[in-house]
Amino acid sequence: MTNQSFVSENTRRNITWAEVAKIFHLEHLGQKHTVEPVTENKKPPEEMSDAELVASLNRVYNPAEIEAALIAEEEEDAPDSELSKYYPAPYYAKYNCLGYVKHTKDGEVEVQLCNFAPRISCEILYDDGEEVTREYEITVRDENGLDLPTFRVPASSFGKLDWVGEKLPARCRLDVTGSVEKHIVNAMKGSSAHADLRSIYAHTGWVKQDGEYRFLLPGNPLCEVELEGKHANYGMVAETRESDLSYLVGMLELTFVPYDVMYPLLSMVFLSPLNSFLRQAGYEPKFVFTLIGRTGSKKSTLSALMLSFFGQFTELSMPMSFADTPNSILYAVSHLDDVLTCVDDSHPSTKNDVDNMNLIAEKLVRGYGDRAQRNRLTSEISMRKTRPPQGNAIMTMEFVPAIGESSLARTFCIETTPESIDLKVLQDVQDHARDGVLQRCMYSFLCWEKESYLADGKDEAFIASLRESFAEARWMWRNRLTAGKIIFHDRLPDTLACLTLGFRMLLRFLLDRKMLTEDQRQKRLAEFLTILTEHARKQSVAVVADKPTHVFLRNLFAMVDGGMVSITDREKPKIGNTVVGYEDDTYYYLLLDKSIGEVKRFCENTNQTFTLSSKALTKQLKEEGLLVPFGASNSDSIKVLKKNVRVTRLRRAEVLKILSTLD
């Protein structure tokens, strides 16, 4: 009997006798009929035949009441009945399917929109540091009652419903009915009244919220930060332990890494949380710290150790490398405010690898050195928003990048060697870093910076003090370099001033935390200034050596020494295809176009860059006082073996002086 069934016209599904029995055992109509239906022979229902049961039910209950009871039972047992509360009228969810009540001339009709129930479960404000966009977190239950994985959709593309095909399985489909997309969007927008609201930051660094400064990093309990890819290794350990600061002091005192490497590295670390305020002061750091060393010099390990103040990094999990594309690197660093990052050496093995590394280095250095991005247009011919590099960066390389004088002046290069590193102590420090010691040190520093300079409206005074301190440090460095007879690029005092501010801030923090005495602070600062002076001397030599005129002369005379080309005596000239000029006791007379062609070929074969034209090189030689004009002309003809030869005349003594400084 229980396997027999009939079709309910309204519900359009089979109803078994078991369901009928369940309904009519006084579950819905029991308040009206207080006795079970009986037959003429007084049999109990379980002993009745089908005909007897139907006859008995029809005598006791009105057919309309039976149908209404069946519908009520279906609605009460529907597993998705709680979903309807999310949707405003006329929308509803029934059997996990979204629908709406359509008003017609014949009355209300239920229309199914799709065979799943989607809703907005969270509205997200997504701040990438440049603009705030909106995203919706979508929750979906399919018709089988299965809750599908949630996903996010940008608000700008939400209404197109492309996410139905992209994010949902093929079994989830839209019904073919009028304006189905508009109805679904409207219903889901209505469901957002029950949605959570979250603010997610996609960048790091200081932000001011409701008058209070917070430092954005994953792990900060006061804000939600999401970073992509390897940048997810950035993170904060929001606790302080005074004992941890002893390890920081140890990094200043121990010689497991030479002071002339460790001090500048630490100055970069503690300069980084000042960047936002230096930018407002008009003196944002505009250089890239470049750590140079051959394989085995631990340059990647040391860089990862410095980054460990801001997260969990090793030499195998660096944020970026020269194997990445230039655009991906510039995009990534535009979201790393007030922290230190690193573009790690990729060990170039071919000329193409070297050329690519120099190209990336050039773009990175220009980005940080100018703190600007190129303007770009969107497909709609409107200006695309761009964001320059943020925070500070370390590059690790095996050699000084061949990026020209101007770009090299935007770097600060320091060399490390394998024999200068105490590997055992370095391993101990790495172990402490993995335990979060350096992250806790940085959290303590950030709390101190906030308490000392940012709380209670002190930020404007802090910015003003940074402006004054920077100007004082820059003037000090100009005088110090001049007194030391160091020839320097105009950018170098600015770079040294920034590093000095970072190191001073570190020492002031340790002094306030009673980890250093005033005498110890003064001693460390004096050592730092001495170290930086020596690095400045080396940096100046490197920058001067990369002047196009110096690159030209260095390579031309290297070819002369190697017998690849020749400069012959003007009075007793030699003839041959290798001759690129003539000389006497006062001047060099160069066949300039031929000399430039030979130098360019030589540079290409030796992984160097030299691209100046004859006109541009002539201009620079003249500006530097090397070229002696022939009256109003920069070149003229001279007699060589009774033939007129057009040459450019250079001062011999000045050329030899430059070559001696490049040895």
Image: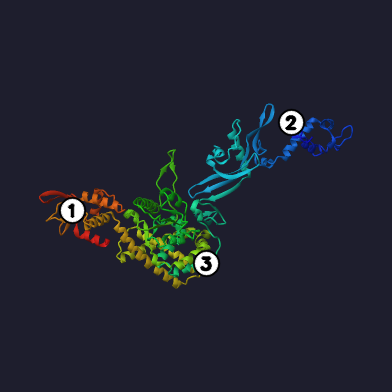
Residue 468 in the image: x percent, y percent? Answer: 41, 61
Q: How far apart are marks 2 and 3 (CA)?
A: 76 Å
Residue 201 in the image: x percent, y percent? Answer: 52, 51
Is 562 placed left or right of 377 in the picture? left
Closer-to-camera residue (164/647): 164
Is 561 placed left or right of 73 in the picture? left
**At numbered mark 1, what does the secondary structure look like: helix, strand or loop?**
strand
Nearer the N terminus, badge 2 or badge 3? Answer: 2
**At numbered mark 3, what does the secondary structure look like: helix, strand or loop?**
helix
Q: Is residue 347 visible?
A: yes
Q: Name the residue under label 1.
A: 581
Closer-to-camera residue (133/549): 549
Q: Can residue 32 be seen in this view?
A: no
Label 2 close to label 3 by CB (< 8 Å): no
Is 102 placed left or right of 505 in the picture? right
Q: Name the residue under label 3.
A: 244
- Residue type at tag 2: Val
Mark number, residue 102: none
Image quadrant holding the N terminus, namely top right
**At numbered mark 2, what does the secondary structure look like: helix, strand or loop?**
strand
Q: Quadrant of residue 562?
A: bottom left
Nearer the N terminus, badge 2 or badge 1? Answer: 2
Is 144 placed left or right of 127 in the picture? right
Crowd class of label 1 (few under 14; some 14 to 19; many from 20; radius 10 Å): many
Closer-to-camera residue (359/496): 359
Nearer the N terminus, badge 3 or badge 1? Answer: 3
Q: In which quarter of the image is residue 14?
A: top right
Q: Which of marks 2 and 1 is in front?
A: 2
Mark number, residue 7: 2
- Residue type at tag 3: Asp
- Residue type at tag 1: Gly
